[in-house]
Amino acid sequence: MLSLTLAALLLVIFGTINYFNQKTDDLPFRCFAFSRYDLSRQEGKPFIFTLSQDLRFESKQSGYLLLNGQVTSGSDVTILNRRIALSDGNKIDGDSYRYKIRKIITSTNDTTPEPVFNRLLAEITLDPNHLQLDIIQTDEKSYLIGGPLSYLFTCQRY
């Protein structure tokens, strides 16, 4: 009986240590990736975003998603350089985070028209006001990032 009690106590202690170690490592979360989004569907014209993405959840109060690269829309090629500033974040379950989109900041060298950017935004956001991402660890520093419609990219945490 004593050995069963001792084993249960050790299990609770190690479980508690593991729980708190995992929680302290959640934020800040920073990762970087290169992605290619082909949204051409069946239009007969290319509609492709080739981007580097820097995702940062600094705290529950702030974070951002930096999108930088080029967009091919038909025969037009434009530069995309925007930062989606985030606030009021929360971990909503084991691996999902939801942040409010506070502001989308367009760089001076961004030449992508708003309607073109909005098509990408519709693919990666929950709605125009919220970014919800699933962050699933696949390796020691590698993560699979999922959006509301599909998995978006894999990234390396730094």
Image: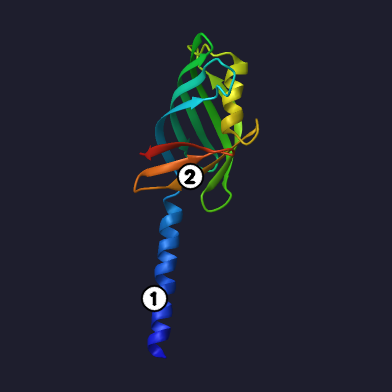
Amino acid at pointer 1: Leu
Percent x, y of residue 155:
40, 37
State the residue at coordinates (40%, 33%). 32
Q: Is residue 40 left or right of residue 8?
A: right
State the residue at coordinates (39%, 80%). 7
The quadrant holding residue 39 is: top right
Q: Nearer the viewer, residue 70 or 20?
A: 70
- Element on which disc 2 rests: strand
Percent x, y of residue 106:
54, 18
- Element on which disc 1 rests: helix
Q: Is residue 11 above or below residue 19?
A: below
Percent x, y of residue 57:
48, 39
Report the residue marked by disc 2. Answer: 135
Report the residue marked by disc 1. Answer: 10
Q: Is residue 48 above or below residue 101?
A: above
Amino acid at pointer 2: Ile
- What crowding class fits label 1: few (fewer than 14 Cα within 10 Å), some (14-19), or many (20 or more)? few
State the residue at coordinates (55%, 21%). 40
Q: Nearer the viewer, residue 69 or 151?
A: 151
Percent x, y of residue 67:
48, 25
- Do residues under tags 1 and 2 come within 8 Å of each other at their CB atoms? no
Quadrant of the rendering where the N terminus is positioned: bottom left
Quadrant of the rendering where the C terminus is positioned: top left
Q: Is residue 127 left or right of residue 5?
A: right
* Pointer 1 or 2: first along the chain: 1
